[in-house]
């Protein structure tokens, strides 16, 4: 009976490792795909948490091979049509030629409108700290850099191994959540 119990535990451990290995391989395959892509397009529904208030908006995003991202705000209607760009050198947010500004989060590291760019940058070059399966989805835990004040991202992949949602955390507090849809990588 003890031998059977030991065998069962070994099988369960191997199955767990198998799922973890698959999750890690899937995360690395997505990174490779994104690094080879000429263009990545997706829609993002964003919720920014400032502690005392939440901001919700949606954007249609397009990133190029160099890592720059352009976007158009699609919702709410009062913000629809605002366009912008984000990249390693910063970004811009304009409407009818007028520059707009969101307050920064994480001690000035991120603006809610730059969160899709942070997501892609982290998927392309961030530090993958863990990969697992959660509720049937692959979950990647990544840091956007190796700095002590790095942003931490939890990213869930859909059944097609594409980003479906992500949480951006700073100091173990979620500051931005994204729901990602209509991902096209070419």
Image (cartoon, rainbow, N blue to C red):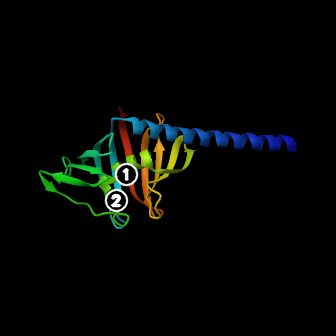
Q: Please rate how many residues cluster around mark 2, counting C-alpha atoms within 10 Å: few if below 14, some from 14 to 19, many from 20.
A: many
| Circle 2 residue | 110
> Which residue is found at the position 80% from the left and 40% from the top?
7
Q: Residue 78 placed where, x, y %?
A: 19, 52
Position of 142 with respect to 62 (left or right) is right
Image coordinates of residue 25 in percent, x first then y, are 55, 38
Please identify the quarter of the rendering in which residue 105 is found.
bottom left
What's the mark number on residue 118?
A: 1
* Residue 26 place in picture, x, y as percent: 52, 38
In the displayed structure image, the side of residue 137 where residue 144 appears, left or right:
left
Disc 1 crowd, CA 10 A, few/some/many (<14, 14-19, 20+): many
Q: CA distance from mark 1 to mark 2?
A: 8 Å
Q: Which residue occupies 50% across, 40% down? A: 28
Mark 1–mark 2 CB contact (< 8 Å): yes
Which residue occupies 28% across, 64% down? 103
Residue at the image position 31 percent from the left and 63 percent from the top: 104
Residue that protrudes farthest toward the top in the picture: 186
Q: Quadrant of residue 106?
A: bottom left
Closer to us: 36 or 163: 36
Q: Position of residue 111 (x, y in %)?
A: 31, 58
């Amino acid at each position: 009976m003890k031998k059977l119990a030991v065998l069962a535990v070994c099988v369960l451990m191997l199955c767990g490792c198998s799922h973890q290995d698959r999750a890690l391989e899937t995360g690395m395959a997505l990174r490779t795909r994104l690094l080879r892509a000429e263009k990545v397009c997706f829609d993002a529904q964003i919720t920014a948490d400032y502690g005392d208030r939440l901001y919700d908006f949606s954007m249609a995003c397009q990133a190029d091979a160099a890592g720059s991202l352009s976007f158009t705000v699609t919702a709410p209607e009062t913000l629809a049509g605002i366009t912008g760009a984000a990249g390693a050198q910063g970004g811009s947010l304009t409407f009818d030629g007028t520059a707009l500004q969101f307050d920064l989060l994480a001690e000035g590291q991120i603006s809610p409108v730059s969160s899709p760019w942070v997501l892609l940058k982290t998927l392309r070059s961030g530090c993958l700290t863990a990969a697992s399966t959660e509720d049937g989805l692959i979950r990647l835990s990544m840091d956007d850099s190796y700095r002590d004040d790095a942003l931490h991202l939890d990213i869930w992949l859909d059944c097609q191994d594409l980003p479906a949602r992500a949480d951006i955390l700073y100091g173990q507090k979620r500051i931005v959540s994204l729901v990602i849809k209509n991902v096209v990588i070419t």
